[in-house]
Every structure is written in C-alpha cells, then in structure tokens.
Image: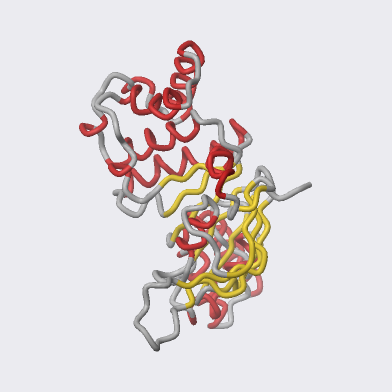
Amino acid sequence: MEPILSARDVSFAYDNYEEKQLPPIVLDDISLDIQPGEFVAVLGHNGSGKSTLAKHFNAILLPTAGTVYVNGINTKEEDRLYDIRQSAGMVFQNPDNQLVATIVEEDVAFALENLGVPPEEIRRRVDESLKAVGMYEYREHSPHQLSGGQKQRVAIAGIIAMRPKCIVLDEPTAMLDPQGRKEVLQTIRQLGGQFGITVVLITHYMDEAAQSGRVVVVDNGKVILDGPPRQVFSHVELLKSVGLDVPQATELAWLLRQDGYNLPDDILFEEECVQAIEKLLEEHHVSH
C-alpha cells in the first residue's frame, strides 16, 4: 500500500538568516511514511520542528533538501497544489484564523462553493460534516459567539466537507480550555472510524498522543522515536532528557519501578495503573 504522506530525506532551513551565518536547520534528514487510515501523533517540545513538518504535509513549506509526497504527488509540483490540498487538509491552532463567514453553515460551505460543488451536494456535505463534529444544532449561529472548542470543531467540519484523504492538525487544542480540548480530541478520534480519514495530530500534550495509534517524537529536527504509544512512552528517561513529559500514569509506574516495585513498563492510562498497584498490593499481602 502506498503511503498517503511520505517524507524522503527531508531537511529544511529558513532562509531569512543573517549574512555570514549558517541557516538554522529546522528539519534534519527526516524520512517518514504515514499509511492510509493511520492516526499518528507527532510529539515534540516548542522549537523541535514538529509544526514545520506539518506544514510540509500541506505544501505550505517546501523542503530545502529531500522530497515530500502527498497521495503520491511531489509537493514541489506547483501545478498540483490544488490536488495536494484536496488530499491533505490542514487545521491550525487558532480557529478564528480559519472562520470566514458570519453563519456556521456558511463557513463550512465556503470552500465547497468556491470549488463549484453543486448546491444540493453542498447542503448534504455541510449537514453531514456538522453532525460528525456535533455542531449541527449550531448551524445557524454566528461562529464568533461559540466557545473555542466549538469554533475548532466548526473548522474541522469545514475540512471534512472537502472530503480529504488526510487531515493534518497543528496543535488544534493549544488555545482551548480542558473541556474544549476534550471535545476536539473526541472529534479527531472519530475521523478515522467514520470517514476513513488519515489523521496527523501535532501536539505537545501527552494524553492526546497516548490516544493515537502511533507516536512520532521529534527533537532538534530529527525523529528520535516512532512506534505505538505504549512502546514510545516506555522510554521515560529519553523523553525527559529532551524536555518532554509522559502520561501521569506512566510516570507514576516508572517512579514506583525506580523504588523496586514490580510494575509493567507499558502503562499508559490511570485505570491500568490502579489495577497494577492493586495487584501488587494483593501479592504483597499474600506473601506476608
């Protein structure tokens, strides 16, 4: 199966650097394939290169060296930009930057109207997309009267309506309160199951990454870990060494293991941690 997104030996440096000074390398020889239907979280601290990588998957940025393919199209093919962005939609941090209309349903319909989609098909897609993100009842509201989480879900609906094969979300919950984050993450998790859309989530929240199918950790423009969440988050010391945390349950289990308690090294969620500690206490009680 051909990857929906593919980076081949990709490096990137911004060219607005001072004369006689080497350009800052933001991405450093990254190779990465993302398969259709995957839910991949790309994790890294601020300045790690994760958002720069995201912008390459939508041809907002082009590699200084190497090649990026979106649905088999080289992003350097300028005449294929429309096809690239039809294949990989992008959702940004601030939903206000993506809302263009004064009514929710008009905002979701905006891009479709510009593409010349027939009115009856627009109506069907808008309704379906708003229902998918739980915002159908707000279809006649003004977007600017909505909460941050609701605005972001409307922005996601606008992308879903375009029927992309992949959605790249660049820290979509960074500006939201806990309830808004929860709403948006729930929506993101439904995309694959409901529409078969590949999801790439750029985040610095460990709990969001833990709910993905695959975690890619970026540091100083390089991929340092890539695998299922349980495998990646078992590398507690490495993650801490590059300025990242791990899920709270993972850290508690790790700390207890440091003190000699026999707990699994792949704990991700609170319920698992509670069960493992309960089992440990039962064994300790029985042995005494």
Quarter of the image where one finds residue 19: bottom left
Q: Compared to 224, does 226 lie above or below?
A: above
Does 259 sit above or below residue 222?
A: below
Classify residue 256 as left or right of residue 35: left
Q: Position of residue 244 (x, y in %)?
A: 45, 72
Give the image location of residue 262, x and y in percent: 63, 75
Which residue occupies 55% across, 51% down? 200
**Please, is residue 175 above or below residue 238 in the view?**
above
Q: Residue at left 30%, top 33%?
A: 100
Residue 237 or residue 120, whichever sits in front: 120
Point 45% across, 44% down: residue: 185
Residue 265: x and y in percent read 62, 70
For this view, does 116 lie left or right of residue 68? Answer: left
Relative to the observer, which residue lies in front, 19 or 161? 19
Residue furthest top as drawn: 120
The residue under the point 27% across, 24% down is 103
Q: In the rendered view, would you say 58 is above or below 183? A: below
Q: Residue 278: give x, y in percent of width and height.
A: 56, 61
Q: Quadrant of residue 171?
A: bottom left
